[in-house]
Amino acid sequence: MSVARPRLASLAGLGLALGAPIVATLAASGSLPGTDDAVTAVLINEAFMWGLTLVVLAIMLFGERRPLASIGLVRPTSAALQTGAGLAMILLVLATIAGAIVQALGPPTEAGGPEMMVLGLPLWLQLFAAVSAGFTEEILFRGYAIERLTELTGRRWLGALLPVIVFGAVHAPFWGLGHALVAGLTGLWLTLAYLLRRNLWINITAHAGLDALVFIATYLAALHIPTPA
């Protein structure tokens, strides 16, 4: 097989893994969906991300002829899942601190619109989105992007840094700059975790666990907010 074929496949995979989320985010940015359309919008977004992830995995398996282990998708173990769960708690603390600092510094953020839209979703859908993001975003932005960028450029720092920037940037149009900065920092910690262990199950568990904890905490807090008379 020609050496150019897997290289071209990797370029195509990277274009999809990093470029497609940017294009989709920009195309979808604008007014928030109404209450009746929010569930549909979330489901469409998750279907898009899963479709994109499956295409990238197909490129890796059949175009590059590389195994899942080449992006850290090794056999899951209880130790990896426990490490990921512990990391989720650490990330929650770090994200809370980062959020407080960002809020104190005062970069522009959305005026509660996205948060209220998410709060209006059923809790089961919020948790589904958390688990879904754990799988799709860690495969695209961590395992695949880091490994292939490093191989193509020969620079580990570039392979690690560029996905962090893209990961933070895709959060900006919907959530605002403040949230994008916090997401970028969280992406940095997840990147360091991947580089240290090369086990994507740790990242998947940590990412899904962090999002789930945030959604659950926000949902429970909202239950105690008194409604206007």
Image: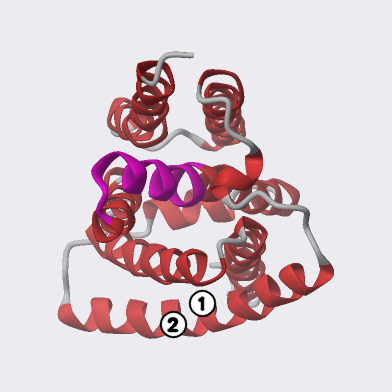
Q: Circle 1 is placed at which residue position?
A: 91
Q: Is residue 110 visible?
A: no
Q: Is residue 110 above or below residue 28?
A: below
> Is residue 209 among the parts visible in the rendering?
yes
- Residue linked to disc 2: 94
Q: Is residue 147 magenta?
A: yes
Q: What crowding class fits label 1: few (fewer than 14 Cα within 10 Å), some (14-19), or many (20 or more)? A: many
- Exactly how many numbered labels are in the figure? 2
Q: Position of residue 226 (x, y in %)?
A: 59, 74
Q: SS of the residue at dot 1? A: helix
Viewed as shown, does residue 150 lie left or right of 189? left
Q: Is residue 78 left or right of residue 109?
A: right
90 in the magenta segment: no
The residue sitting at 26% across, 77% down in the picture is 103
The prevailing secondary structure element of the residues shown in magenta is: helix
The answer to whether 23 is drawn above or below residue 209 in the figure is above
Q: Quadrant of residue 181?
A: bottom left
Residue extent of the magenta highlight: 140-155
